[in-house]
Amino acid sequence: MLTSNRFKCDNINLHYMKGPDNGPPVVLLHGLSDSWQSYLTLIPYLLPYYTLYLPDLRGHGKSYRAKNYRVVDYVYDIRLFLKNLFDEPVHLIGHSLGAAVLIVIAAEYPEKCRSISLIEPFIFKNKLNDKEFRKYFSGSLELCKKYRDIDTISKNAKETGTLARKRAADFLKLDKKTIVTVLENDVFDGFDPDKLLPEIACPVLILRGNTELEGFITKEKTNYFKDKIKNCVIEYLEKSSHVVHVDQPVETARHLLEFFASV
């Protein structure tokens, strides 16, 4: 039902999946160290109503390897992707790092955005110094350096079961510099949410998980978003961790579909 495609432009070579032409276009961006497949649980609920586009970000999945992996570098690719594939503004969904990319797109290239939906946005520099955050990604990086097979990586991963195997597959396809850029605190160079968020004119939906389940967005950060963004709706999914769309796909889809219908 989804087809594999390549987008090539200005030395960019992004892999993306596309769904059947079922309605207005929706572009979904995954998070750090992930791939388009992070949305597998959500896709069935959106597919009947929208034409889905799911790119692998640079350095991830089947997309090309690059020199730099800052938010602004991912933005460069996605801006050209949107410019060349769509004549009209589209709905955009981004999880974590993908949400950071969309904040820049919405602020600086508003003509491409019908709406943006930010799932647990990864935009705050203090997260880079969070002990558990750094432990997870430094541990993942060591696993990738030490082992080169899915079975061994999945057995040593934080995740369990089929999710562990999925994450192991993601790590094997990942350019390790994507993680190094985060651990060296360079990922947010040139990215200033204080300046960007007030510039966003399109409707914004934010979905946040439970901080007791490793969600990133605290009540304080929720108030920050409300203060900075003019046209913003925030929904709290109490049973979700940072991967809201994986933990509660039905509820995530309901919020997204209702939001899209209102735009």
Image (cartoon, rainbow, N blue to C red):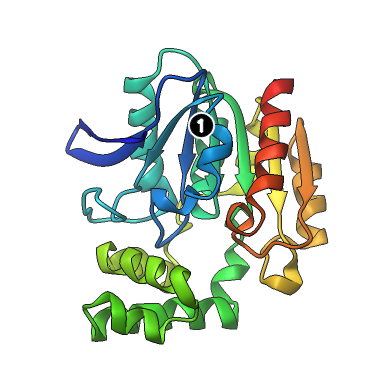
**Residue named by callout 1:** 47
User: For the point 76% across and 57% down, which residue is it?
Assistant: 221
Image coords of residue 165 (percent x, y): 38, 71
Mark 1 burial class by Cα count in 10 Å: few <14, some 14-19, many 20+: some
- Residue 68 versus residue 147 in the image, above or below: above
User: For the point 27% across and 68% down, which residue is it?
Assistant: 172
- Residue 89 versus residue 252 in the image, above or below: above
Instruction: Judge by depth and name the residue closer to the eye, 197 or 7.
Output: 7
Instruction: Judge by depth and name the residue closer to the eye, 161 or 29.
Output: 161
Image coords of residue 149 (percent x, y): 23, 77
Residue 192 is left or right of residue 175, and the answer is right
The part of the image, by quadrant, that contains residue 78 is: top left
Q: What residue type is labelled 1?
A: Leu
In the rendered image, the quadrant that contains the C terminus is top right
Q: How many marks?
A: 1
Image coords of residue 124 (percent x, y): 61, 60
User: For the point 64% across and 31% down, which residue is it?
Assistant: 200
Residue 26 is left or right of residue 60, and the answer is right
